[in-house]
Image (cartoon, coloured by chain):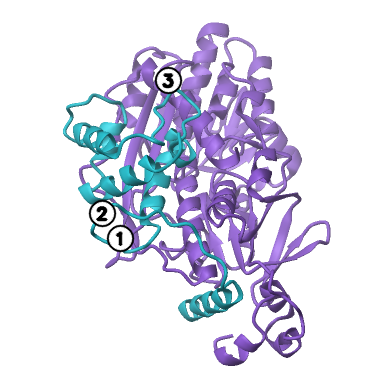
Chain colours: A purple, B cyan
Amino acid sequence: MNTINRRDFAKSVGALSLISAAGVSGCASIGAVSSAKAKPKVVVVGGGYGGATAAKYIAMWSEGKIDVTLIERDAQFVSCPLSNLVLGGSKSIGDISVAYGGLAKYGVKHLNGEATGFNATKKTIFLADGTTLAYDRLILSPGIDFMLESLPGLASPEARSKVLAAWKAGPETVALRNQLVAMKDGGVFAIHIPKAPFRCPPGPYERACQIAWYFQREKPKSKVLILDANEDVQSKKGLFTKAWNGQFKGLIEYRNNQEIQDVDANTNTLKMTFGDDLKADVLNVLPPMRAGNIAAMNGLNNANKRWCHVDWLTYESTAVPGVHILGDSLQVAPAMPKSGHMANQHGKICAAAVIELLTGGVVNPTPMATNTCYSFIDDKNVVHVASVHHYDAKQKTMLSVTGAGGLSPEQNALEGVYANSWAKSIWADMLA
Amino acid sequence: MHTRTSQFAAAVAASALSQLALSQTPSALSQTPASPNLARNLAAQCANCHGTNGKSVTEVASLAGQNAPVIVQKMKDYREGKLPATVMTQLARGYSDEQVALMADYFSRQSK
C-alpha cells in the first residue's frame, strides 16, 4: 500500500469504499466512477460501552459526513455494570437493558448480526449471514472471551449453562439469579475469580456483596464463598472487607490464592490446584479471560497472545493497520481498569482520532480519560474508585495523573443515588 | 507502515471530501490549543455523568450553557476541597487550569 504514488491515486480520488473494496489493483478503473458524494466508511463491531460510544460520537461529531455502521449480535444492550443487582434481586434485567434505536438520529446504521472476521488488506468485514461490508476504518469493541482451554470441564455449552460465568450481562445473569432463587436455605454459593487481569476488577467482590445481601434477607443460613486465584482483593479492598467483616459477617468468607485445575459441572465441584475438591450448591466460575474472539482470532492479540496493543492516540492496533480496538480487549495502560466507563472514554478518544484520520485533520496529541467506577454493597449503599489518565508522549502510553482520583471514605447512600444516575447518564451518552 | 498508511488514508480522504468542514468551537483563549478540537475532546470526558455535550439527563448538574467563570471557579473549589463532593474533588485534581478553562469555555457555548 505504501508503494502507491499519491499523485496517481489522486486522479482516481473519491469512492473510498470502492477503493477499499477493490484494493490497490483496482485504482485504474475507479476514475470512471462518479464519486463526489462518497463518504468515508467506518464499521464498528460491538455495541457495548466502547463501540456504541464510538459509533455515536463519530456520527455526531462528523455531522453525518462519515458513514457509520454498528454491528451488534444482540438485539439490545444489556449493561454489565449494575448486573450484579439483578443477582441480588433489587433490579430486573429490563432495568439494565437499553434499545439501539436511539442511534438512528445520528445516522448510525445498526446491523443486528455477528461479525466473524475481516480482511485488513481489502478492508472488508464479514458477517455470519454472508454479508460483506467495506470499511475505511474498522473499530472493534468485542469485550472479552474466555480461555476455556485451561478448564476442559467447561468446554461444552452444557457445562457452561450449569456452572455459569454470567460475566456478560444477559440471559446468563437471569439464569444465575434463578439458580440462587432455587437454592435451599443453608446452601453455599461459591464464586471463583481468575488471576488478574480480568474484566471489571471490583465486579466479583460486588457480586459477593449482592448475593450476601439477598441471602441475609431471604436465606439467612446460606453462605457466600469467594475463592480468589489472586493473592488479594483486586479492587476497593478496604471498602469491601469492611462490609464482609461488618454487615455481612458470617455470611461471606474470602479465601486467597485459590487456583483451580478444572471444574466438574456435573457435581458443581472445583478441582483445586492445592487442597481438597470444593463443592458448592451454586457454583459461579469466571474463567480466565482474553480479548474478544474477533480480535483474538485475527492476530490483534499481540500482548502475550491474550490482549491487544494499541496506539493510545488513535486506538489503532499495533498489529494490523486500519483496525482500531476499544475496551476490555486492550492490553491496559498502567493503572487503567477494564471498565465500562473506561471503554466509553476509549470510544470518544478513538472517535475523535478516526474523524481526523479520515478528514486529513490533526490527531489530538494530548488525550485525557477519566474512570469512575461504582460498586453496590447492598441495594442502596455504594463505594467508588475514580482516576484521571493522561497521555505520556515519552512513554507513549496513558498514565494516571498523580494526586487525582481516589476512593469513597466509606459506603454511603448518596453515592447509591449517583451510581444509578451514572448508569442512566452513560447509557444515554452511548445510545440516546 | 502504520503511520504512512494513516497519513495516506487521511490524504485521500481529504481530497475526496474537500467540502467537509467539521464544526470547531473557537476558543476564547489567546493560547491556541494543540488540536482544534481539544476543548470538545476534553469536555467529552464529562459526558458519562453530565450528559452528552453537558446536557444532563439525571439530577447531576447540566454543564451546557453555564457561565464559563462559574465552572472554572467550581473546579477550583473542588480541587482545593472548598466544595464538598464524592467524586469531583478527586477528578478535578486531574486537570490543569488551561484544560479546565477549555472545557468551561466549550460547555458555556452549548445550548441548554
**Camera-side residue of A86 and A42:** A42
Q: Residue at x 48, y 33 (%)?
A: A203
Relative placement, left or right, of A297 versus B60 is right
The residue indicated by pointer 2 is B29
- The subunit letter for the residue under badge 3 reads A
Circles 2 and 3 on the same subunit: no
Circles 1 and 3 on the same subunit: no
The N terminus of chain A - image quarter: bottom right
How far across and how far down the image is residue B109, in percent? Answer: 39, 43
Category of crowding for the residue at label 3, using alpha-carbon neighbours closer than 10 angstroms: few (below 14), some (14–19), many (at least 20): many
Q: Could you tell me which secondary element the residue under label 3 belongs to? A: helix
Category of crowding for the residue at label 1, using alpha-carbon neighbours closer than 10 angstroms: few (below 14), some (14–19), many (at least 20): some
- The subunit letter for the residue under badge 2 reads B
Q: Amino acid at mark 1?
A: Pro
**Label ID, residue B11:** none
Give me the C-alpha separation between circle 2 and circle 1. 9 Å
Labels 1 and 3 touching (C-beta < 8 A): no
